[in-house]
Structures are given as structure tokens and as C-alpha cells.
């Protein structure tokens, strides 16, 4: 009876505590901003958040991402934030980075259902682990998964912004500039070298509304065992065996069956087949040779000899090439405006700059050494090199390789309706 009452009390306590568990905190908003000097891929618990090349996707080499409600479901009690940095430039000095120092910085702002918030940055000391992977080597399998063991990784190094042109992130808590996760600081960096970063952090949250929840286990009390009846053993005297009599069985006669003879089946009667009579021999016919006649002989005239006539060879007429002085035209209403460039002229130093109506350089959108052929979309946000918004008018985008103008585009900024 005492065990049954104890189980009932525990069941009532579990039912009364279940509403309190469902009233936990959950995420309502998450904002991620990443600055990098080369290709960077950011993941949370193995899910891709953003993959970007800042030199081609944004004018200030940064990406700001407001995470969707579906991405909020990636967060849990245990979390893993990973960054994969890839060195895509042979000489960093060509890209405007002094001392060949390259890396990535991030700012992750979290807001909870109680109105409070939390900020995680790349400048948090002692929170990141790093691993260097040279170009031809393979990355460790599952390194961006929460269950991966990074015991042999080294602590990540931090560095301030490398140059005045490097984008800066400010910590909203103290207003200071957030340090970078240093990827490479060698004098001559190698292309396709990678640096992997990991950071683990805990959150006391439950799944946000709309996210799948884990089922709550239901407690069922054990049934009370019924005591077994006590068995009483009573000894019973063993009965005495009766006297044994000798019994001789009566022999039975053996029954022998006599087989019955079965007559063989009758043989089929042969049907006589009539013989075919041989045909009579043919009567010999006397051969009479035909009389000779004069048959005219037909002469076949000879075929004329073919004369080879050479076919005229086709001549490829090159299409007229538009001169660099004849610019294309892009008309837009509100910035930003997207400009497509191609690196089909082979390896070299490419530069895309915006010029004013008088020909002066307002802003450099792309300045990088490219070693492989590809194309990209580059965005101009309508500002000059100091971040000031320009007025309506006509501007020019000039695409140059090693000092040679490849393409010139007229950017006509008009007023919207």
C-alpha cells in the first residue's frame, strides 16, 4: 500500500510540473553578419547559413543575414558554429591586404522570448579551435558536426583589422571593434589552402513555435505485485510394487501374400505400307546442234575521265568587335545596380571601377588577381569611396585587365515614378 501511494504522488508531481517545462525560453530572432577577406562558409550544427565571396557579392566585403524562422529551428541546447575559410588569391598584396594577413570576423545577435539578448563574436577569447588544411589535403570527415572530436586542434589566433580598407564590426555591448579569426599570415600564401574554425556554446532554450518538439515521456506507475500463496509439502509414502508374473506372448501366424500374374499388353498390329513404284526412265533425246548465225558484237564506249574541280574553301569572316570606347548602357532607378564581368582573357589582375561624368574614379568595386576563368556579378550601391551617396546622373563602369580596358559600361541613374 505504501509503494502504491508513493507512485500516485510522483505521478501527480509529474503532471503538475509539465506546464512549467513548456514555459521555457525560445529564440525569437537571430542576426548574423560576416566579414572576410576571401571565401568563407558559415554553418550551425551542420546546416549552411551563408556561403559568400565578399569581393564579388558585396561592396564592403561583408554579408548581413537575418535568419529565417526555419533557421531558428537549427538552434538547440548544445550548439556548434563553424567557419570554413579558403585562400583563393595567390598574392594577397594584389588584393590590397598588407602583410598577407587574411581571416574572417562574425557577429551573431540572439533575442529570446523574455526580451533579453545574447551576442557571440569572433573576438571571444578562448572559444574557437582552428585546424590548417593545405591545398591538396582532404578535410576531416564530419568536422562541422556536433559529435566530432577536435581534441587535437589548436586554439584560434585573433588579429585586429588588417588595413584601413578592411571592413570592421563593432560589438554592440561595448562599441569596440571585433577582432578577426586569423587564417594566414605567411609572406607567400598558397592558393586553395584552408583554415577550419569551430566554436561550441550552450543555450537554455526550448524549440521555437513552429519547430518540431521532442515527445514528452509519459510516466506509468508499476502495478502492485500479488503475493504468491505459500505451498505446503506433505510427504506421501511410496506404494509397494505388486508381484511380477511371467507372461509369454502367443505367436502370431505370418501372412504371406501370393502375387497375381499380370498378362502383358497386346502388341499393336502392323499396317502394311504400299511400296512406291519407280518412275520409268526418260526417253533419250538426240541432241541437234544449232545452226551458226552471225551475231553482231556490241561495243561499249569508254567512260570519260573525270576532271577534279577544287571546291572553294570557306573563309571565316570575324564579327565586328565592339570597341572599348563604345560603352554598353545600364539604366536603373534605385541602387544597388548589378554589373556582370567575365574573366575570359586568362589569368591576370582585374579591376572594376566607377567613373564620374568627368572621368574621375569615384569608387573601386573589384581589384583582385584571378588565376582561373569565371564570371561574376558585382554590385554598386551608388556611393563613392568615402560612402557618400551620389546624385542622379550618368556614370561609367570601367573593367580593366593589367592596365588594358576590356569593357566600359554607362550607368544611367534616373528618377523613379
Image (cartoon, grey):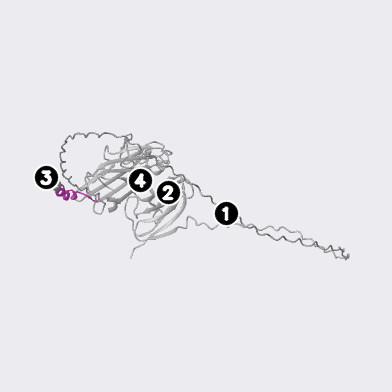
Give the residue number, with chain letter if any, for mark 3. Answer: 5
Q: Looking at the image, tell me whether mark 1 or mark 4 is earlier in sequence order.
A: 4
Q: Nearer the viewer, residue 42 or 189?
A: 42
| Label disc, if present, on residue 351 of the rendered structure | 2
Q: Looking at the image, tell me whether mark 3 or mark 2 is earlier in sequence order.
A: 3
Q: Residues within 10 Å of mark 1 (few under 14, many from 20)?
A: few
Label 3 with label 4: CB-CB less than 8 Å: no
Depth-wise, is mark 3 or mark 4 nearer the camera? 3
Which secondary structure class fits the magenta region best? helix
Residue 161 percent coordinates (x, y): 31, 41
Horizontally, is 298 left or right of 197 in the view? Answer: right
Q: Secondary structure at mark 4?
A: strand
Residue 147 percent coordinates (x, y): 31, 40
| Label disc, if present, on residue 306 of the rendered structure | none
Q: Label 1 to label 3, Cα distance in Å?
A: 94 Å
Give the residue number, with chain letter if any, for mark 1. Answer: 265
Residue 216 percent coordinates (x, y): 22, 48
Can residue 115 be seen at all in this image of the molecule? no
Depth-wise, is mark 1 or mark 3 nearer the camera? 1
Q: Quadrant of residue 246?
A: top left
Q: Residues within 10 Å of mark 3 (few under 14, many from 20)?
A: few
Depth-wise, is mark 1 or mark 4 nearer the camera? 1
The magenta region covers 14-28
Q: Secondary structure at mark 1?
A: loop
Can residue 124 be seen at all in this image of the molecule? yes
Give the residue number, with chain letter if any, for mark 4. Answer: 41
Amino acid at each position: 500500500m505504501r509503494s502504491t501511494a508513493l507512485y500516485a504522488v510522483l505521478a501527480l508531481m509529474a503532471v503538475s510540473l509539465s506546464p512549467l517545462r513548456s514555459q521555457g525560453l525560445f529564440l525569437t530572432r537571430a542576426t548574423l553578419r560576416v566579414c572576410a577577406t576571401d571565401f568563407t562558409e558559415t554553418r550551425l550544427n551542420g546546416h549552411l547559413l551563408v556561403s559568400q565571396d565578399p569581393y564579388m557579392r558585396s561592396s564592403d566585403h561583408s554579408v548581413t543575414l537575418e535568419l529565417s524562422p526555419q533557421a531558428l529551428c537549427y538552434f538547440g541546447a548544445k550548439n556548434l558554429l563553424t567557419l570554413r575559410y579558403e585562400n583563393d588569391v595567390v598574392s594577397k598584396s594584389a588584393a590590397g591586404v598588407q602583410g598577407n594577413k587574411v581571416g574572417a570576423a562574425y557577429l551573431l545577435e540572439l533575442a529570446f522570448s523574455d526580451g533579453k539578448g545574447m551576442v557571440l563574436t569572433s573576438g571571444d577569447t578562448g572559444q574557437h579551435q582552428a585546424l590548417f588544411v593545405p591545398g591538396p589535403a582532404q578535410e576531416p570527415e564530419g568536422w562541422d558536426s556536433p559529435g566530432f572530436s577536435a581534441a587535437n586542434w589548436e586554439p584560434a589566433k585573433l588579429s585586429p583589422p588588417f588595413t584601413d580598407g578592411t571592413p570592421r564590426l563593432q560589438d554592440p555591448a561595448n562599441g569596440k571593434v571585433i577582432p578577426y579569426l586569423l587564417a594566414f599570415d605567411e609572406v607567400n600564401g598558397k592558393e586553395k589552402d584552408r583554415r577550419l574554425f569551430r566554436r561550441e556554446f550552450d543555450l537554455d532554450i526550448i524549440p521555437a513555435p513552429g519547430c518540431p518538439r521532442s515527445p514528452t515521456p509519459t510516466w506509468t506507475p508499476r502495478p502492485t505485485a500479488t503475493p504468491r500463496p505459500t505451498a505446503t509439502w506433505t510427504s506421501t509414502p511410496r506404494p509397494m510394487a505388486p508381484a511380477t508374473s511371467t507372461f509369454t506372448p502367443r505367436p502370431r501366424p505370418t501372412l504371406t501374400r501370393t502375387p497375381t500374374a499380370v498378362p502383358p499388353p497386346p502388341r499393336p498390329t502392323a499396317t502394311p505400307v504400299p511400296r512406291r513404284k519407280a518412275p520409268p526412265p526418260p526417253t533419250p533425246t538426240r541432241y541437234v546442234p544449232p545452226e551458226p548465225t552471225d551475231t553482231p558484237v556490241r561495243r561499249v564506249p569508254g567512260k570519260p575521265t573525270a576532271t577534279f574541280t577544287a571546291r572553294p574553301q570557306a573563309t571565316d569572316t570575324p564579327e565586328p568587335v565592339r570597341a572599348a570606347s563604345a560603352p554598353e548602357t545600364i539604366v536603373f532607378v534605385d541602387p544597388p545596380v548589378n554589373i556582370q564581368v567575365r574573366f575570359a582573357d586568362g589569368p591576370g589582375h582585374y579591376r572594376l571601377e566607377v567613373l564620374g561624368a568627368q572621368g574621375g574614379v569615384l569608387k573601386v568595386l573589384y581589384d583582385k588577381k584571378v588565376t582561373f576563368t569565371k564570371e561574376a556579378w558585382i554590385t554598386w550601391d551608388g556611393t563613392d569611396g568615402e560612402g557618400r551617396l551620389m546624385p542622379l546622373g550618368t556614370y561609367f563602369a570601367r573593367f580593366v585587365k593589367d592596365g588594358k580596358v576590356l569593357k566600359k559600361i554607362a550607368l544611367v541613374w534616373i528618377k523613379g515614378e
